[in-house]
Amino acid sequence: MKVVAFNGSPRVNGNTSQSLKIVLAELEKEGIETEIVQLGGRKVFGCLACGKCRENKNNRCARTDDEMNTFIQKMEEADGIIIGSPTYFSNVSTEVKALIDRCGFVAKSNGGSMLRGKVGTSVVSVRRAGSTFTYSAINFFFGIAEMIICSSDYWNMTLSRDPGDVQKDAEGIKTFQILGKNMAKLLKQVNA
C-alpha cells in the first residue's frame, strides 16, 4: 500500500510539511509506503473548463503546460491521499485549489471511478482562524470523488504560524499521530 501526501504550502519545511511528516511516520510504522509531493510554490494552473477531459477520457487533464498530470497520476496510483494546506484567508492555498479542481474534473469526466474507494484525509495548518473552511474544502473534494474520509480525535489541524510552531502544539501533534494510526487501520481494512 502507498500513501501520497501533497504539501500545499510553498514553505518546503513549514508547519504543513512538518504536520504531514507526523502523520506519515505513523503510516510508515505500519509498513505503508509514503511519499511527500511538494505542491506549494510549484507552477500549476487552475482549470480552464475546456471540457477536453470529458472528450479524451484518458484520466489526464488536456492542459500540459504544468506538472498537474504528474500529480493526478500519483493520486490515481496511490491507495491513500493526504492533502495538506496552510490556511490562506479561510481557504486552501491556490496550488491545492488547482489540484482539487483539475483532478476532480478529470475524475468525474472519466466515469468517476479514478479515486473511488481510496482513503483520503486533510492536514491543515493555521495561525488562528479559518482552518475549518480549509479542512472542509479538502474533504468536500474527497467526498465528491467517492473516497473514504479518514479522521482523528479532533479536526486535522494545528495552530501554528512560524515554521516549527507545530512542534509546540502538543494537541496538534497528538491529533496527527492518531490520524496516521487511523489511516493505517482504514487502509488495511479497505485493502484486505
Image (cartoon, rainbow, N blue to C red):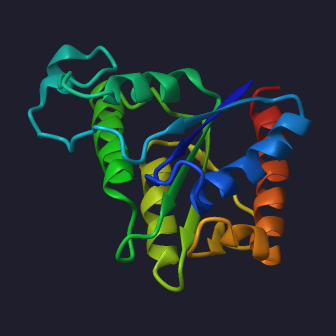
Q: Position of residue 185 (x, y in %)?
A: 85, 43
Q: Quadrant of residue 88?
A: bottom left
Task: State the residue at coordinates (22%, 41%).
Answer: 45
In the rendered image, the residue lying farthest to the left is: 50
Task: State the residue at coordinates (84%, 67%).
Answer: 174
Please give left or right for residue 185 compared with residue 138 in the image: right
Task: State the residue at coordinates (77%, 53%).
Answer: 22
Pick the residue in front: 182 or 38.
38
Task: State the residue at coordinates (80%, 29%).
Answer: 32
Classify the position of the N terminus by image quarter. top right
Q: Is residue 24 above or below residue 34?
A: below
Please give left or right for residue 71 compared with residue 178 in the image: left
Pick the residue in front: 168 or 25.
168
Q: Is residue 117 above or below residue 174?
A: above
Q: Quadrant of residue 44?
A: top left
Pick the residue in front: 128 or 146.
128
> From where the camera sits, is residue 150 visible?
no
